[in-house]
Amino acid sequence: MTVELSVCTSCRLDRSGPYEAEKTDGLPFARLLEAAATDDPQLRIRPIGCLLQCDRACSAGLTAQGKWSYAFDTLPPTQASATMLVAFARLYAASQDGVIAFARWPKGIQAHFGARLPPMFG
């Protein structure tokens, strides 16, 4: 089953100046995530123009059909964050319903956990 990790490409840590699409923190973070997930056919990185988490940049969401979804925020746009988030996504992909025991979460990810949402019905 394919797991989708949506990442906001318009996130900016410093929002004091005018918005410039090519000078965001989210776009390079999306590239780091793509590189970290390149060897995993179950994981799809989906760059999204905006996740409306501007005060909590950088942000990402993890979804899969029939599974609980997760939202993450205040992710530093670093290799370490990309590695941590992809590690969580791999646990998620391996899970039956998307629920992952806190004891199994990669170190540091809990600080960036925003929400868990139930699977869609229908």
Image (cartoon, grey):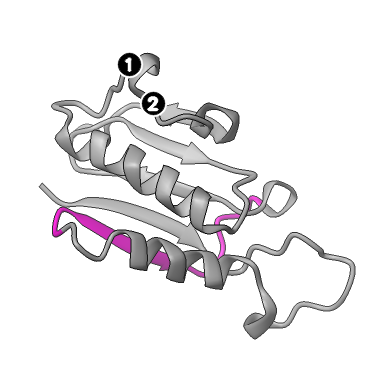
* Residue sitting farthest toward the left: 1
* Helix, strand or loop under label 2: loop
Q: Which residue is drawn at 71% across and 64% down?
A: 12
Residue 4, position as x, y percentages in the image: 28, 53
* Helix, strand or loop under label 1: loop
State the residue in front, 92 or 84: 84
Mark 1 lies on residue: 101
Amino acid type indicated by mark 2: Trp
Amino acid type indicated by mark 1: Ala
Q: Which residue is drawn at 33% across and 26% down?
A: 118
> Is residue 89 rendered magenta in the image?
no
Mark 1, Cα crowd under 10 Å, few <14 / some 14-19 / many 20+, is few
Q: Quick check: 60 left or right of 52?
A: left
Q: Residue at x 54, y 72 (%)?
A: 27
Give the CA distance from mark 1 to mark 2.
7 Å
Q: Quick check: 102 left or right of 41?
A: right
> Can you tell which quarter of the image residue 9 is in?
bottom right
State the residue in front, 40 or 68: 40
Classify the position of the C terminus by image quarter: top left
Residue 75, position as x, y percentages in the image: 59, 47
Residue 57, position as x, y percentages in the image: 66, 53
> Can you tell which quarter of the image residue 52 is in?
bottom right
Mark 2 lies on residue: 105
Mark 2, Cα crowd under 10 Å, few <14 / some 14-19 / many 20+, is some
Residue 34, position as x, y percentages in the image: 35, 66
State the residue in front, 116 or 106: 106
Q: What stretch is highlighted in magenta?
A: 41-53
Q: Quick check: 116 left or right of 112?
A: left
Q: Residue 15 carries which label?
A: none
- The answer to whether the residues at label 1 and label 2 have Cβ atoms under 8 Å apart is yes
> Is residue 52 rendered magenta in the image?
yes
